[in-house]
Image (spheres, rainbow, N blue to C red):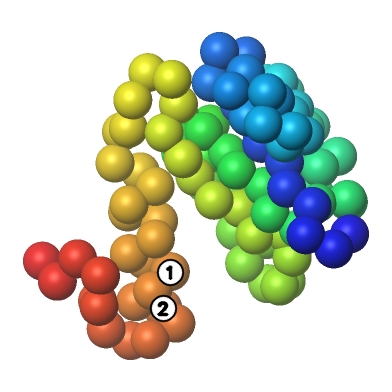
Amino acid sequence: MTGKIAIVGDGDSIMVFKAAGVATFPAENERKAREMLRKAAQEYEVIFLTEELARALGDFLKRFDETPYPVILPIPSGKGSTGYGDEMLKSAMERALGVDILFQK
């Protein structure tokens, strides 16, 4: 499992990652994304997940907070950023360090 990276998201958003050699798991809805995350989590250390799906799967993603791998990283989709990835990063940093060192707002 060393250094393996994957992405879960809608087809248009993950296409560029596939061209770069990243394993892709297409998911057009919450149900399919949950299924693809379960599958990817068995083999990959870092999994990118489009923000729209990450927001919909918020409670499901909390189970991954308890283990070092895989790391689930919300990223903007082809439609652009919703800001959810920034929110999640800020929250994780505050939990880990007890202070907001990134955004300071």
Q: Residue furthest left?
A: 105
Considering the numbered disc 2 on the image, is that residue within a helix, a strand or a loop? helix
Q: Position of residue 74 (x, y in %)?
A: 49, 45
Q: Position of residue 17 (x, y in %)?
A: 63, 29
User: Observer-nearest residue: 63 or 39?
Assistant: 39
User: Observer-nearest residue: 38 or 50?
Assistant: 50
Considering the numbered disc 1 on the image, is that residue within a helix, a strand or a loop? helix
Q: Which residue is mark 2?
A: 95
Give me the residue at 38% from left, 74% from top: 93
Q: Is residue 80 above or below residue 101?
A: above
Location of residue 71 by image quarter: bottom right
Give me the residue at 29% from left, 41% from top: 83
Q: Position of residue 1 (x, y in %)?
A: 89, 59
Q: Which residue is mark 1?
A: 92
Give the amino acid type for the residue marked by disc 2 in the picture. Arg
Q: Are marks 2 and 1 in contact (CB under 8 Å)?
A: yes
Left or right: 105 with respect to 102?
A: left
Give the amino acid type for the residue marked by disc 1 in the picture. Ala
Q: Is residue 52 above or below residue 60?
A: above
Q: Is residue 31 visible?
A: no
Give me the residue at 24% from left, 76% from top: 100
CA–CA distance between discs 2 and 1? 5 Å
Q: Is residue 81 above or below residue 99?
A: above
Q: Residue furthest front?
A: 20
